[in-house]
Image (cartoon, rainbow, N blue to C red):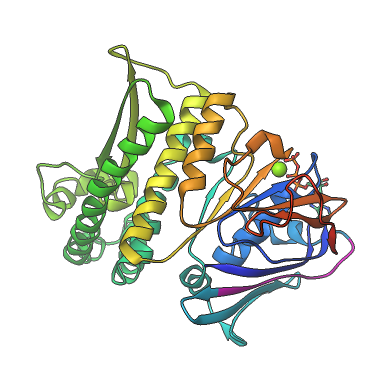
Amino acid sequence: MPLTHLEIQNFRLLKKVVIEPGAKLNVITGWNAAGKTTLLEATHVLATGRSFRTKRWSELIRHGADSLMVHGIVVEGDQEHRVGLAFDGRGRTIRVDGSAMKGAAVLARHVPLLAITPELHFEFLRSGRHRRGLLDWWLFHVEPDFYPKWLRYQRLLGQRNAALRCSSPPAVQFLWDEDLAALGEDLDHSRQNFFRQLREEFLQTAGTLLQRGAVSLRFLRGWEDSEPLLAQLQRTRASDQRRGFTQSGPHLADLRLDLDMDGIRTQLSHGQQKLLVIALRLAQLRLFMAKTGRRCVLLADDIGAELDRIHRQRVCDVLEALETQIFLTAMEARDFAPRSRAHSMFHVEQSCINSVSSSSSTSKKSDLPDVEMLK
Ligand SMILES: Nc1ncnc2c1ncn2[C@@H]1O[C@H](COP(=O)(O)OP(=O)(O)OP(=O)(O)O)[C@@H](O)[C@H]1O
Ligand SMILES: [Mg+2]
């Protein structure tokens, strides 16, 4: 089970919160501005070293405080790890089991986390970086070689682009082409292998959630299918020089999502976009668990918004069946009612989080608040 203990201090409106999340579904309810998204955001910061709402760290510190802290205990098999992150207005400190660490990748390795936020489907449809990220998150966790190769590729690409922009002599501009192409082909090979599995899993989940229309998902690798990357880099050198950047390679890979309804390619409604992107996230998560045998933390913020009752129930059923830890927010418990009682309920009010019921313990009734103030 990933997180057995979560402690948050001076994070936005949350002054001090300590919770013991359940191993599976944790439903967090509360009115507008109560702090539900903030709880998820703090968990996201702990697992990835960044917020899903802002790049400005100072925004995250509670007004009037001068630093923030998020701390958690992660259990994996018989091992327990303490992970923590603090920000004091100038710099970020990351600690794992008491030792200071550099870079957030170490947090991600300890707490694999995926998020479904209300903006996810907009980000996904708008930005190729987000679509590529879906493949690369999985490869980061599953293929140990992928991340170092990806970093090296980014470095070489940055050098090539800088040389193109400075109009350096061609011998310098194209010095890295062979290495860049070899790494690019390698990264693409990993992505294509994963994409084939992702597509299968996605089509199944999308079928369950939508139950109407033919969904298709395609992978575009970032250069012509018919040509090796090196050949394309060499063929487009003049055009790269004119434009000042490299126009082919896995940094431009993409995913295309389509839905045909009654034989017609449709413009997706918000609800359909949301369901398809949820299906992609869940496919990514299921494949992660199947491949690694590990669990993942899934954040689902306001997942029921823009979905009708039937689709909301389908999403709820799919989430409930997942053998992983989920933090899900909803305005009221009835907005997202799991069928089984094997879930934990928390209520957020005036920046306090109350454990309302833990239905894994059969002695507690879900409508009888067990108000354990966890200030
Ligand atoms: N740095 C900060 N210090 C104190 N309060 C903050 C800070 N940043 C944001 N807030 C407050 O936190 C509240 C927002 O909390 P949050 O977004 O978690 O609410 P929510 O429960 O998810 O609400 P909704 O249901 O509307 O999505 C707002 O009232 C906002 O003013
Ligand atoms: Mg919210």
Identity of the residue drawn at 42% across and 33% down? 276
Identity of the residue drawn at 79% across and 50% down? 348
Q: Main secondary structure of the magenta part?
A: strand
Q: Return the x and y of residue 165 as percentages of the image width and height.
A: 37, 54
Res. 1 visible in picture = yes
The quarter of the displayed image where residue 4 is located: bottom right
How many labels, in total? 0
* 222 or 61, nearer to the observer: 61
Q: Is residue 213 left or right of residue 186?
A: right
Res. 166 visible in picture = no
Q: Is residue 56 left or right of residue 277?
A: right
* 221 or 113, nearer to the observer: 113
- Magenta span has 262? no
Identity of the residue drawn at 32% across and 37% down? 204
Q: Return the x and y of residue 27 as percentages of the image width and height.
A: 66, 49
Task: Find the magenta span and give its range.
Answer: 64-74
* 4 or 279, nearer to the observer: 4
- Magenta span has 66? yes
In the rendered image, the residue lying farthest to the front is 363
Q: Return the x and y of residue 129 as percentages of the image width and height.
A: 42, 47
Residue 344 in the image: above or below residue 267 = below
> Which image quadrant: the C terminus?
bottom right
User: Which corner quadrant of the figure contains ligand 2?
Assistant: top right
In the rendered image, the residue lying farthest to the bottom is 99
Q: Return the x and y of residue 192 as percentages of the image width and height.
A: 22, 50
